[in-house]
Image (cartoon, rainbow, N blue to C red):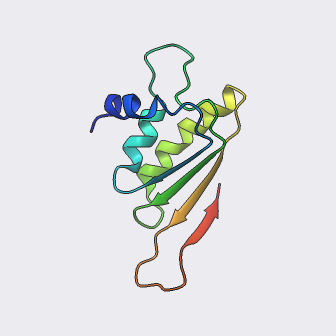
Amino acid sequence: MDCEKWVKLIRPFRGTKWFHIAGDLSTDIILSLQLSRKPRETLLPALHKLLIREPESRCAPLREAVEPFMHSCWLSGRFIAVEYERLWVNELRGTGTTYA
């Protein structure tokens, strides 16, 4: 699915306050949050917290995609908490969480 399709899928959920992203397409979804055909349009204007389950430990492309999104939010005066949840395999105790 290309970024424009993600934008069309996400756009109706303008009131979303918590957005949880998981899976192999996480980087594509984050990149689509930065796209907009209209100047100064924000896809999720009510967003307060972005929860990301990393597909692998410290996934560099995913973290690199989050940085410009967060920077654009800060420039517009919106502060969003980002929480990375690491996927544990063969672990019965649950998941590990780090904060950015």
Q: Quadrant of the image for the N terminus?
A: top left
Q: Is residue 94 above or below residue 4?
A: below
Q: Residue furthest top?
A: 39
Residue drawn 68% across the image and 33% down it: 74
Residue drawn 47% across the image and 84% down it: 91
Image spot of residue 100 (x, y percent): 65, 54
Image spot of residue 9 (x, y percent): 38, 33
Image spot of residue 68 (x, y percent): 54, 36
Q: Is residue 65 above or below residue 20?
A: above
| Number of numbered labels in the structure image | 0
Q: Quadrant of residue 17?
A: top right
Q: Residue furthest left?
A: 1
Q: Is residue 10 above or below residue 67?
A: above
Residue drawn 48% across the image and 34% down it: 33
Q: Is residue 68 above or below residue 41?
A: below
35 or 64: nearer the viewer:
35
Image spot of residue 15 (x, y percent): 59, 33
